[in-house]
Image (tube, rainbow, N blue to C red):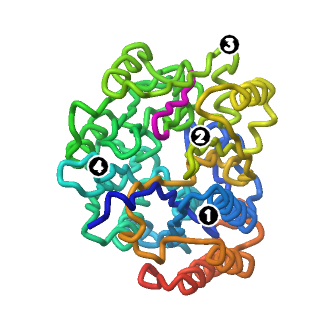
Amino acid sequence: MSRADAVVEINFDGIIGPSHNYAGLSVGNLAAVGNAGRVSRPRDAALEGVAKMRTALSLGLTQGILLPHPRPDADWLAALGTTPETADRLLIANAMSASAMWAANAATVSPAADSADGRCHLSVANLLTMPHRAHEWPATLAQLRVAFANGAFAVHGPVPAPFGDEGAANHMRLASAGTAGVEIFVYGRSGGEFPARQHEQASRAVARRHGLDPAHTLFWQQSDAAIAAGAFHNDVVAVADGTILFAHEQAFADRTAAFDALRAVLPAVEIVEVPAPQVPLADAIRSYLFNAQLVTRPAGGGVLILPREAQDVDSVRTYVDALVAGNGPIRDVQFVDVRESMANGGGPACLRLRVLCDPATVDPRFLVDGARLDRIAGVIERNWPERIVPDALGDPELHQAIQAARSALLAELDLSELES
């Protein structure tokens, strides 16, 4: 079991896979749909992700990885009575999706301090709202069961249909150092023409599975306005870390009741709310201001890891400059280049899954330092496709190249057991 004094937050980033492409499959994700048909650059995308992990290491944070899934997903296609060679354009596009790179959708995580049995619980997300993501969970679950095989963890399968669960992207945790936390599950109900992806019953099921204290577990409804504006997950309009909640004014359906409930169970909370007149909701979503990694340096101090695109939106740039110059809890910002991921609708926060645990309980093959990232970058540079054009998604030669690239990475990391 883990040692409480050794527990730290580990960010497990999804390595962007060699099939990264712009098929525009994610309804409600404005960037993904808007960039459909573009030529993608899988090699650049994956190297951008590696560089982001280096930024986290430079801040003194502990860094982990999750691996790309097998692509095309031949097992999923076989269940549909077809193959990578015979599938129609839409099915092969779904089977080739590299969206597992967005590890924030891999699972929901409750640390040991919050659970009744003193274990860290992970529930893999079913992602059933979108066809290109609904077939991810078996490969994700297989990885989680290897990475977190230690008895300090309990790894759960997905919540059953029809209750859509999209993982940590709709979950926040706040806590004072060394104490049990307050876990906030954010669900949606209506988003105009766009689907609300996180079901309230899925959130409540995960909380029960994890053995959370009902008095320290909150369920908030995401605002219809946020979903309709393109906030397909809560982490597009809110993010939390430690005792800091950073959120847009229009993030939640009943912000007053939500914040009152939070303050009642965590009086130390510091709510940094961005007013809509200063940063309109459309600007927040376009810039991914809230899809930042909000982290705390080991010595203290909140840091926002933001995409470089946030500097291109005037209202956001002005707000961030004032934020870090003020006397609030967020005093620093780090900008990272994740343009390939951003163009497909995922910012820095999408690329990582937070797990609060003792690193000694994690399979070390899933943890990285600078030298290990050098090795990963070398595999990417040698094997990842330089570019993928949309019409090539059904090309057998591309499929072979993608499979060989993933195999090379697994071999480099001594994780060939995840080959299939």
Q: Amino acid at mark 2?
A: Gly
Q: Which residue is mark 4?
A: 113
Report crowding for label 1: few under 14, some 14 to 19, many 20 or more residues within 10 A (C-alpha).
many
- Give the position of the N terminus as an image quadrant: bottom left
Mark 3 or 4, nearer chain start: 4
User: Element under label 3?
Assistant: loop
Comparing labels 3 and 4, the label whose residue is closer to the camera: 4
Give the residues in magenta: 241-248
Q: Amino acid at mark 3?
A: Pro
89 and 260: which one is in front? Answer: 260
Which secondary structure type mostly characterizes the magenta part of the structure?
strand
Other-residue count near label 3 (Cα within 10 Å), few / some / many at <14 / 14–19 / ≥20? few
Tag in front: 2 or 3: 2
Ranked by sequence position, the earlier of labels 1 and 3 is 1
User: Would you name the residue on which mark 1 appears?
Assistant: 16
Q: Which residue is mark 3?
A: 277
- Disc 2 and disc 3: Cα gap in Å? 24 Å
The spot of residue 305 in percent (x, y) is 66, 45
Residue 363: image location, x then y, percent? 40, 75
Give the class, few, some or many, for how many residues have Cα within 10 Å of label 4's Cα (few <14, many ≥20). some
Residue 384, labelled with which disc?
none
Per the image, is 58 magenta? no
- Category of crowding for the residue at label 2, using alpha-carbon neighbours closer than 10 angstroms: few (below 14), some (14–19), many (at least 20): many
In the picture, residue 302 is in which quadrant?
top right
Which of pointers 4 and 2 lies earlier in the amino acid sequence?
Answer: 4
Residue 346 at x, y = what percent?
Answer: 61, 47
Residue occupying image coordinates x 49% and y 34%: 234
Tell me which amino acid carries mark 1. Ile
| Residue occupying the point 50% across, 56% down | 103
Q: Is residue 88 visible?
A: no
